Image (tube, rainbow, N blue to C red):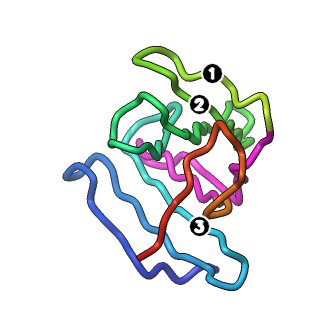
Amino acid sequence: MVNYKYSIELEANIADLWWTIDDVRKEITFDLHIRTMGWIALGISPGGGMTGADIGVGWVDSRGQVNFQDRHASGFFRPMIDNTTNDWFVLQGRELNGWTAIQFKRLLDTCDSMDYPIKVR
C-alpha cells in the first residue's frame, strides 16, 4: 500500500490525483481517479499543454484487465505510442460505480527523449 504525500482535486467530483515520490528509487507513484467508464490519462509537459507532453493512458477492459500505455504528444491530436522505451508502469486499477481508478509509476527522469522529466523542488 502506498501512503500518498500529495493530492489535488483536478475537477470537483470528476477527477482526483494522489502522488508520492520515492527519493531513493527516484520514482513517482500516481493514483488517478476519474468519473468515467473508459480510458483515463495523465500528461506531463513543459507548459501544461499537449505539445511535448509525456502521457500515460490507461483503461480497464471488459475482462477487468488493466491496460496502460506510454504516449507522447507532439501537437493537438492523438498522442503517439512512445516507440523508444515504455516508462510508465501500471500497478493496479479498477472500474467501480462509474469511476475508473489506476495506480501507476515512472522514474522522475527516464532519460527518454519522448518523456518529460519531473523536477522535484
Say above or below: 107 vs 66: below
Q: Which mark is residue 25?
A: none
Q: Position of residue 96 (x, y in %)?
A: 50, 49
Residue at image coords 40%, 46%: 34
Q: Is residue 121 above or below residue 60?
A: below
Of labels 2 and 3, earlier in sequence is 3
Q: In the figure, residue 35 lies in which quadrant?
A: top left
The percent coordinates of residue 37 (x first, y second) are: 47, 34
- State the separation of the CA atoms marked 2 and 1: 5 Å
Residue 50, percent from left and from top: 40, 30
Question: Which quarter of the rendering shows the N terminus?
Answer: bottom right
Q: Amino acid at mark 3?
A: Thr
Residue stretch in magenta: 85-104
The amino acid at mark 1 is Met
Task: Label 2: state its secondary structure.
Answer: strand
Query: Within 10 Å of the Cα at label 3, are there few (<14), some (14-19), or many (20+) other Cα atoms?
Result: many
As for residue 96 lying within the magenta part, the answer is yes
Tell me the amino acid under the disc marked 2: His
Residue 44 relative to residue 28: left or right: left
* Marks 2 and 1 in Cβ contact (< 8 Å): yes
Q: Nearer the viewer, mark 3 or mark 1?
A: 1
Q: Which mark is residue 72?
A: 2
Please indicate whether residue 35 sits to the left or right of residue 60 in the image. Answer: left
Q: Is residue 50 left or right of residue 23?
A: left
**Type of secondary structure dominating the magenta stretch:** strand
- What residue does disc 3 label? 29
**Circle number at residue 80:** 1
Residue 60 pos. (x, y %):
64, 39
N-terminal-most mark, 2 or 1? 2
Give me the C-alpha separation between circle 3 and circle 1.
Answer: 23 Å
